[in-house]
Image (cartoon, helix red, strand yellow):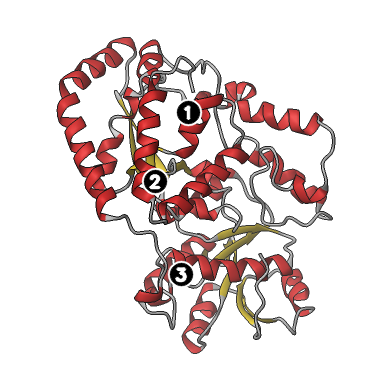
Amino acid sequence: MEIVSDRKVRLLYVGNDANMANQFSAYIQKVDFNVVDNALHAVKWLEENKGVDAILCEKQIPGQTGIEFHKTLRKRFSKNNSIPFILVAKDRGKKDLSEAVKNGIDDFYVHPVSVDNIIDRVQFLKELKVNLKQEKIGTSKDDIKEYKIGFWKRSFDVLVAGTVLLLASPFLLLVILAIRLESKGKVYYISKRVGTGYKIFDFYKLRSMYPDADKRLKEFQHLNQYVHDEEEHVNAAPEPIEQSSVSGTMLIGDDTEVEEEQHNIKKRENAKSAFVKFDNDPRITKVGHIIRKLSIDELPQLINVLKGDMSIVGNRPLPLYEAEVLTTDEWTDRFNGPAGITGLWQVEARGRSSKMSPEERKQLDIKYVEYANSKRAFLIDMWIVLRTFKAVFQKENV
């Protein structure tokens, strides 16, 4: 998405990488690039200057990390939290990305950066923050675009969640006992998920896997459907360049320029494991197979519904390791609608085949957001709920 502006993009860079200043100096007509070498000077600069469009900060700066500096800024300049904050580093791992997401960092780039991409990204992040109701200088709350759950949808959520939990409580006790008898460990499972507006919350499920399932994820990665789909795509006949950036499981990247081949290859490798799904997952217990088949493991999510974290119908809230690679403007729309227990892609997948590609899944998520913001939203939700009842009793394990 290219955004044309009639003024320079004003950036504050916190760090001492000489190459950054050299790169941006060639864009003097587009960028007002300001450099400080540490957090103290950055705070002083922000106090003396107004209207900065974004802050670029090295992962490591004198005396602290970039994430720690971000926390300081949020406390000290709470009214200016709408300013995009972008980390830059020589390298990054999944742990770095996870920490960045948890702490509200807007994006994470690896040297060398593309100035054009940074400019476009800053413009997009500013628009995104408006849509996600993060304060923006000069914009009133009435002008902020944000998904708001409708009266009928919320009423339906509370009524269904409360009624089902009340009626199912005796049955749930029996299921909990069966889970505990088969394998030791907690009978419930809590994970961090990313929902509407990138909100991170505790996501509840009955445990259907062995207690060490997360640790065994890499052990069974060769069985991941999405990895095999990517391999099949790579071995297939070559497609035109303009299609290759969004095919298979190449989810998202900071740079999509064709000439940056090595960078994009690395991005694809990291993205292969972003969506995880197995046929006949070996980490699932015997009881787990039954409660998954009947979607009984999903019942505790009704607590999330009552809390307002989720809705009955919406886009599936994603684990951090999936959400962190869906941060560019092509896919962020899927977070501009409600998070839900069941949704469009679930019933579509179960209606035809379990092997739905990440590309198809994301497209359906975005399609549902369009429905959720339309006048027909509640009727479409009811249609999805009816299809879900049928899908629950399918023979295929999705």
Residue toward you, 198 or 184: 198
- When asked about the image quadrant of residue 268, the answer is top right
Image x and y of residue 263, in percent: 76, 50
Q: Which mark is residue 214?
A: 1
Vertical placement of residue 67 versus 366, above or below: below
Q: Which comes sooner in the sequence, label 1 or label 2? A: 1
Residue toward you, 129 or 350: 350
Q: Whole-Å distance between the Cαs marked 1 and 3?
A: 36 Å
Side of 182 relative to 231 (left or right) = left
Q: Residue at x 39, y 46 (%)?
A: 339
Q: Residue at x 80, y 48 (%)?
A: 262
- Circle 1 sits in a helix, a strand or a loop, which is it? helix
- Circle 2 sits in a helix, a strand or a loop, which is it? loop
Q: Which residue is mark 2?
A: 339
Residue toward you, 113 or 387: 387
Q: Which comes sooner in the sequence, label 2 or label 3? A: 3
Q: Are marks 2 and 3 in contact (CB under 8 Å)?
A: no
Vertical placement of residue 273 versus 398, above or below: below
Vertical placement of residue 345 versus 394, above or below: below
Q: Looking at the figure, which quarter contains the N terminus?
A: bottom right
Identified by mark 2, the residue type is Ala
Image x and y of residue 288, in percent: 38, 17
Image x and y of residue 312, in percent: 32, 40
Q: Residue at x 69, y 46 (%)?
A: 246
Q: Which residue is mark 3?
A: 130
Identified by mark 1, the residue type is Asp
Q: Are marks 1 and 3 in contact (CB under 8 Å)?
A: no
- Circle 3 sits in a helix, a strand or a loop, which is it? helix
Alpha-carbon neighbours of circle 2 within 10 Å: few (<14), some, or many (≥20)? Answer: many
Identified by mark 3, the residue type is Val
- When asked about the image quadrant of residue 162, the answer is top left
- In the picture as drawn, the residue positioned furthest to the bottom comes out as 48
